[in-house]
Image (tube, rainbow, N blue to C red):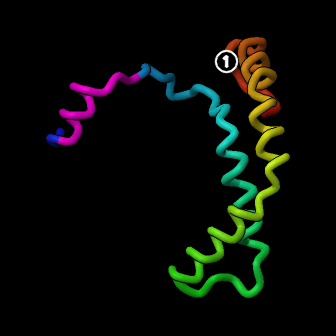
């Protein structure tokens, strides 16, 4: 238990979250899209500076309509989890 942990637990509110709870965050899908775009680059980045440049380029090239579609799907995602009593869904 470090001083950092103490400060976090003392001053910042937190939520109790089940270890088995589904991750509905659209950002997971966005990260997946970014990884796919990075994996498709030829040649792949050779070092950290090239990786940084590639990440920024691919991030800026992500289609905004895909991101907005993911955000708009949150209602359906939450409804699916509720209907599945917190179990697995197609998301």
**Element carrying mark 1:** loop
Q: Give the range drawn in magenta.
A: 4-14
Q: Up-down: is 77 above or below 28?
A: above
Question: Which residue is drawn at the image coordinates 38% and 24% (left, top)?
Answer: 14
From the top left corner, tell me how far across and down residue 68 is, in percent: 79, 40
From the top left corner, tell me how far across and down residue 81 is, in percent: 72, 19
Please tell me whether the stretch drawn in magenta is mainly helix, strand or loop: helix
Q: Pointer 1: what residue?
A: 86
Residue 63: in magenta span: no
Q: Which quarter of the rendering shows the N terminus?
A: top left
Quarter assignment of residue 70:
top right
Q: Up-down: is 58 above or below 49?
A: above
Question: Which residue is drawn at the image coordinates 77% and 16% (left, top)?
Answer: 79
Quarter assignment of residue 15:
top left
From the top left corner, tell me how far across and down residue 51 is, in percent: 58, 77
Left or right? Give the position of 39 relative to 50.
right
* Neighbours of disc 1 within 10 Å: few (<14), some (14-19), many (20+): some
Please identify the residue farthest to the left as the structure is shown.
3
Question: Which residue is drawn at the image coordinates 52% and 82% (left, top)?
Answer: 49
Q: Up-down: is 6 above or below 44?
A: above
Question: Which residue is drawn at the image coordinates 63% and 83% (left, top)?
Answer: 45
Quarter assignment of residue 71:
top right
Q: Up-down: is 74 above or below 26?
A: above
Residue 7: in magenta span: yes
From the top left corner, tell me how far across and down residue 63 is, in percent: 82, 55
Count of labels shown? 1
Q: Which quarter of the rendering shows the C terminus?
A: top right
């Amino acid at each position: 238990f470090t001083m950092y942990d103490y400060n976090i637990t003392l001053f910042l509110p937190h939520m109790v979250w089940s270890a088995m709870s589904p991750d509905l965050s659209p950002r997971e899908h966005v990260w997946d899209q970014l990884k796919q775009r990075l994996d498709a680059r030829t040649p792949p980045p050779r070092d950290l500076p090239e990786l940084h440049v590639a990440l920024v380029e691919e991030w800026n090239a992500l289609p905004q309509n895909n991101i907005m579609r993911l955000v708009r799907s949150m209602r359906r995602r939450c409804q699916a989890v509720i209907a599945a009593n917190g179990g697995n869904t197609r998301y």
